[in-house]
Amino acid sequence: MDDFRTHLKESLQDKEFEAVYDNKELRYKIIDILVGIRIQYKLSQAELAKKLGTTQAVISRIENGTVNVGIDFLQKVANTFGKKIDIKVA
C-alpha cells in the first residue's frame, strides 16, 4: 500500500495526470452521493429512476461510472429529495 501511495504522490506531480485523477475523484463522489440518497430512502434503482423520470438502466450506468451526469440531473436529484447543491472551486 505504501508503494501505491508513493507512486500516486509522484504521479500527482504531473499536472495532466492530476487533472484526470481529480476528474475521476469528483465522479466517484457524485456516485457515492447518489447511491447514498438511494440507500437513505430505501429505494431500488428502478424506484429512484421513476422518481427522477428516467430508467433503471440509466441509474445503473451512473452508479457504475459509465455515464457522466450533468448539473441538470444533479439539480433534479436535489429538488426531488429536498437537498441543495453546493459547488466550490478551490
Image (spheres, rainbow, N blue to C red):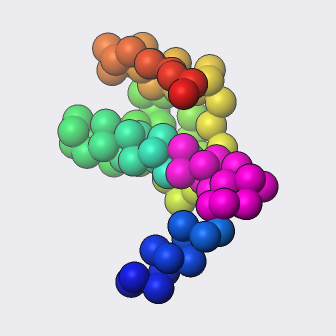
Helix, strand or loop for the magenta stretch, by majority: helix
Identify the residue shown where x is 56% and y is 77%.
7
Point out residue 71 in the picture as x, y percentages from the top left corner.
62, 24
Q: Is residue 43 visible?
A: yes
Q: Residue at x 51, y 21 (%)?
A: 87
In the image, is residue 51 part of the stretch drawn in magenta? no
Q: Quadrant of the N terminus?
A: bottom left
- Residue 3, position in %: x, y? 47, 85
Q: Nearer the viewer, residue 18 or 42?
A: 18
Residue 58, image x and y in percent? 59, 46
Q: Position of residue 85 (x, y in %)?
A: 44, 18
- Residue at point 67% right, 54% down? 18
Query: What span is in magenta?
Result: 12-26
Q: Residue at x 39, y 15 (%)?
A: 84
Query: Eyeballing the image, is 27 above or below 50?
Result: below
Task: Give the left or right position of residue 29, taking residue 35 as reference.
Answer: right
Q: Residue furthest right?
A: 16
Q: Height in image: 5 above or below 41?
A: below
Residue 41 or residue 74, whichever sits in front? 74
Q: Is residue 61 visible?
A: no
Q: Check the image and report above or below for 87 versus 11.
A: above
Left or right placement of residue 35 versus residue 29 in this view: left
- Quadrant of the snapshot with the C terminus: top right
Residue 19 is covered by the magenta coloring = yes
Q: Quadrant of residue 73?
A: top right
Q: How many marks?
A: 0
